Image: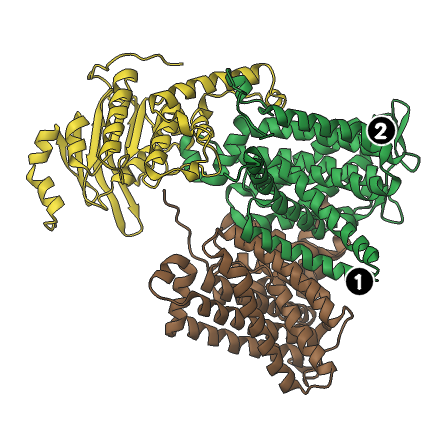
Chain colours: A green, B yellow, C brown
Amino acid sequence: MIYREAGQFKSTYASDQALFPIRQDRVVVGLAVAAAVIAVPLVADEYWLQAVLIPFLIYSLAALGLNLLTGYAGQVSLGTGGFMAVGAYSAFKLASAFPGLSVLVVFLLAGLVTALIGLVFGLPSLRIKGFYLAVATLAAQFFLLWLFNKVAWFTDYASSGTITAPPRTVASIMVTGPAATAPVRYLTALAFVAVFALIAKNLVRGRVGRSWMAIRDRDIAAEIIGVRPLRTKLLAFAISSFFCGVAGAEYVFLYLGSAETLAFDINVSFLVLFMVIIGGLGSILGSFLGAAFIVMVPIFLTNVPHLLGLAMPVALQKQIELMVFGGLIILFLIVEPHGLARLWQIAKEKLRLWPFPY
Amino acid sequence: MREPTGPPSVTSGVPLLEVDEVSVRFGAIQALDRVSLEIERGEIVAIIGPNGAGKTTLLNVVSGFYHPSEGRIRFEGRDRTRLRPYDVAALGVARTFQNVALFKGMSVLDNIMTGRLLKMRGSFLLEALYWGPAMQQELLHRAFVERIIDFLEIEAIRKAGAGTLPYGLQKRVELARALAAEPKLLLLDEPMAGMNVEEKEDMCRFILGVNDEFGTTIALIEHDMSVVMDISDRVIALDYGRKIADGRPEEVRADQGVIDAYLGVSHA
Amino acid sequence: MLELLYGVFVGPVKDMVTGPAFLAEVVIGGLAAGLMYSLVALGFVLIYKASGVFNFAQGVMVLFAALTLVGLMERGAPLVLALLVTMAVMGALAFAIERVVLRPLVNQEQIILFMATIGLNFFLEGFGELVWGSNVKKLDVGIPDSSFVVWGVQVNRLELTAAITAAVLVAGMAIFFQRTRIGRALRAVADDHEAALSIGIPLNTIWVVVWSAAGLVAIVAGIMWGAKSGVQFSLSLIALKALPVLILGGFTSVPGAIVGGLIIGVGEKLAEVYWGPLVGGAIENWFAYVLALAFLLVRPQGLFGERIIERV
C-alpha cells in the first residue's frame, strides 16, 4: 500500500529509464545518502568507522569491480587480490615520487595503471572461457604478488618489505597518514564509492552493459548480432581492474595505513568473489549488500558470544567463520543464486502488495 | 532511421546474396556440398529439406560462423567469404536461431536494444555519465525499438525477463531483436517451430509486413509447407547437403526429387 | 643486455649439462612432486568425468583424509584400522556432499557448481581445523623416508612407493572407466545429467560412488603428502596447483592428469633450481599457472582433452 506505483505514469522514455523511476525509491535513497553523509560521521564511534564502515566501503568498491567483470560480463576472475595490489603499490610509488600530487589524483592514476595491467591479463579471455579463465586469472594473482615481493623497487627499498601511506592533505584536511581522522577517511571512501557506483550503473544500463550481458548470456549469438567479443571483454577487464585498483589504493591509504603483499593474497580474491556471489551477480546493489554481509560476519562472531556470556577463542572464531562463509555460499547458490539483491527485490515486490497477500 | 519504403520491386542486377559452390565439412561429414544459390533484393526465399539436410549450416555459413572449405560467398557483389560474424552483421545481415538464442539475463526491451548495438556510436566516457549525447542517443534508439515493439504487438511484455516468456513469445522477441538492426537480409531459422495456428498466422503477417514496409530481403528455413506456399516468392530445397530444387513454390512442390527426399527414398 | 641473455638462455642450460647427476636428482624430485599433483588431479578428473562437476574442494578432501587418518593414529589406532575408518569417513562425506550440495543443484550451470565447491572448500577447511586442530602432524605409514642409490642417482623409498601406488591406481581407474558397465554409466552422467536420469541411471547412487572413489584417491594422496612433509594446512593449497595440471592434461583424461602433473612438477623444479637464482627465487609460486596459461592459449583443450566444437 505504501509502496504503490499507481498514479506514477511515465510519459517520456527518459523518465522510464531514470535511475529511480519510482518516487518512493527516490525518497529512500535520498534519505540514505543524507544519513550516510551527515548523520554517520556525527554519530558513529571510532570503532564502527574504523573496523566496519571504512572497510565496508572499500570492499564494496572492489566487489563492484568484480561484479562488473564476473556478474555482468561473465568473465570469472580469481585475481582480484592481485589487481588490488597493483592499485596499492602504484599509488604508493606515485605518492612517493610526486609528493605534490593530490592524493585523489593519485588514486585515479593508480586505477589507470591497474586498468592497463587488467587489459594485459584479460587478453587470454578471447581464447579461454569459464573456469579455464579463472585459472588464468590465478596466474595473474600469483605472479603479481610475487613481483611485488621480489622487486624491492616497488617498496622503495624498504627493509621491512611493507608500503606505508604517506600523510597527505586535501584542502588542508589530513586525509591519509596517522593524523587523518576516521570520519575524514570515511567520507573520502564514501565519495569515491558513490561516484563509482553511479558510473557503474550508467554503464550497465546502456550500450556497454548490454554488450557485456550479451557476451555473458550467449557469446556466440552475441557475436553473430555484431558484438565484438575481444573489445567487449577487454573493456570489462579494464574497467573492473580500474575499480579494483582504486579499491586497493584506498585499502592501504585509507584503512590499513601500511601493508605487505600478504594483505592482497588469494584469500582476498575469494573473499571479494564471495561478496559478489552472496550479494548477487549482475547487480550494483548486490555488490554493496554482499560486502556488508561479509564484513559483518566476523564482527557478529566476535560480539555475539560475548553478549551471550560465552567465551570464544580466536582460533575457533576463525574456523567458524570459514565454515559459515562456505556454508552460506552453498546455501545461497541453492536457494537464491541471484543473491541478496534478488531477495531485496522480492521484498520490494511484497511491499507493493502489503498488507494484501497477493 | 529508415522509413518504410513501400513494397519492394524485385529487380535483377546484382543479387543481394550469392552463394557460389560452397562446401562445408565437419571432419568426415559433408554438411554442404557445392551449394550455389542467389537471393535477389526484396525476395522472400524459403529453404526447405529434411532434417540434417544442411539448412542451418547454410545460414551459419552466411552469418560467418563457419567458413566454407570451398566456394565463395558474395554480399552485394563483394566477396565476404572469410569475414567474422560481427563484420557480417555490420554489413546488414541479421538472424534468428533454431533454439531461441535470447539473452536470458536481460529484459525483453534490453534484448531488442542489443539488436541496435551496431547502430550505436558510443563515447564511453559520456555514457559513464549518462549525459548529453549519450543520453540522447539512448533515447533515440529506445524510440526506434518501441516502434518495433508496437509492430510486433509485444508492448505488454517489454519489461519481462526474456527467460520467463513462453516459447512463442520468445520467438517473436528474437524477431524483434533481428529487426532492430535494420537489416538488409534477414535470416530466420524455423521461426514458426512449435507454434499453434494462430501464432503462425501472426508470424506470417509480421514477416510479410517486414518485407512489404521496409523492403527487407528474407530467407527462412521452414518445415510447414502451407506457410512456405503462402508467403515465399521462391523455394530452395536441400538434401544431404546438396541443392536439389530451386524455383517457384508450385514448381518445387511438384518436383519429384523433393518428394523423394521427404518420403525418404534413398539417394546415392 | 648480453649478460641478461646469457643468464637466461645459456647459463642454466650449461649448468644442466655439466652436472647430469644433479640434474637427474632435480628431475626426480620434480617427478615426485608432480606425482603428488597428479594424484590430486586424478580425484578431480574422476569427479569431473563422472558428474561434470569441477570439484574445487578436492585439495581440502586430501587434507581432510590425511587429518582423519593421522588423528585416529594419534589416538592409538593401528594403521589398518585407521585406514578403514578413514575410508568410511570419506564415504560418509561423499554421501553428505551428494545430499546437501549436489542434489539441490542438479543440472545447474557448471559455473554455479564450481562456486558451490569453492564454498565446500572453505567449509571443510574450517571444519577440519575445528575437529582435528591446526598443528602440523607427522604421518608414519611404515615406509622409511630414506634413499638408496641407483646408477649414481639417489632414489627415495617413499617417493618410489608413491609412484608405484599411483601407477596401480591409474591402471585400475582406466580399466574401470573403459571396460565396466558402471564406468560407461558414469561417462553418460558426465555428459548430461537429465538425459542420464531419463534412461534410468540412478544419479544419486552414482554420485555417492564417484565422490567416495575420489575420497579414496584423496586418502592415497593425503598419505603420500603427509608422510613426506607432515599433515598441515598448506596441503589445501595443493588444490590450486592441481588446476594447471588439469589444464595441461585435459579435464577428462586420466593419463592426462598423470602426464600433466609430472610435467608441471618437473617444470617447476627445473625453473626454480636453474632460473630461480636469477630473479630471487620462489618462481614455484607462479610458474605452474603461467605455464598453464601459455598452454591454454595454444591448445585450449589440453594435451589429452576433447576438442570443443561449438554449435549454434
Residue A237 percent across, percent down from the top left: 61, 37
As displayed, is residue A167 above or below residue B240? above
Q: Quadrant of residue A18?
A: top right
Q: Position of residue A275 (x, y in %)?
A: 66, 45
Tell me if B111 is positioned left or right of A343 in this view.
left
> What kind of element bears circle 1?
helix
Q: Nearer the viewer, residue B205 or B97?
A: B205
What's the chain of the residue with tag 1?
A
Which residue is disc 2 drawn over?
A: A98
Residue A257, visible in the rendered structure:
yes
**In the displayed structure, would residue A269 be above or below residue C19?**
above
Is B56 in front, or is A348?
A348
- Residue C36: percent from left, percent from top: 62, 69
Which residue is more in the foreground, A75 or C165?
A75
Three-letter amino acid code at the position of disc 1: Ala
Judge the density around disc 2: few (<14), some (14-19), many (≥20) Cα neighbours within 10 Å: few
Q: Quadrant of the N terminus of chain C?
A: top right
Cα distance between the residues tagged 2 and 1: 43 Å
Q: Earlier in the sequence, mark 2 or mark 1?
A: 2
Q: Quadrant of residue A308?
A: bottom right
Question: What amino acid does circle 2 point to?
Answer: Phe
Which residue lies under the disc numbered 1?
A: A315
Of the residues tagged 2 and 1, which is closer to the observer? 1
User: Can residue C269 be seen in the rendering of this structure?
Assistant: no
Crowdedness near tag 1: few (<14), some (14–19) or many (≥20) residues, C-alpha within 10 Å: some
A169 relative position to A281: left or right: right
Look at the numbered discs 2 and 1 and tell me whether their residues touch, using CB distance below 8 Å.
Answer: no
Residue furthest out toward the front: A355
x and y percent of residue C125 in the render?
Answer: 68, 63
In the depicted structure, whether residue C90 falls above or below residue B232: below
- How many numbered tags mark residues here? 2
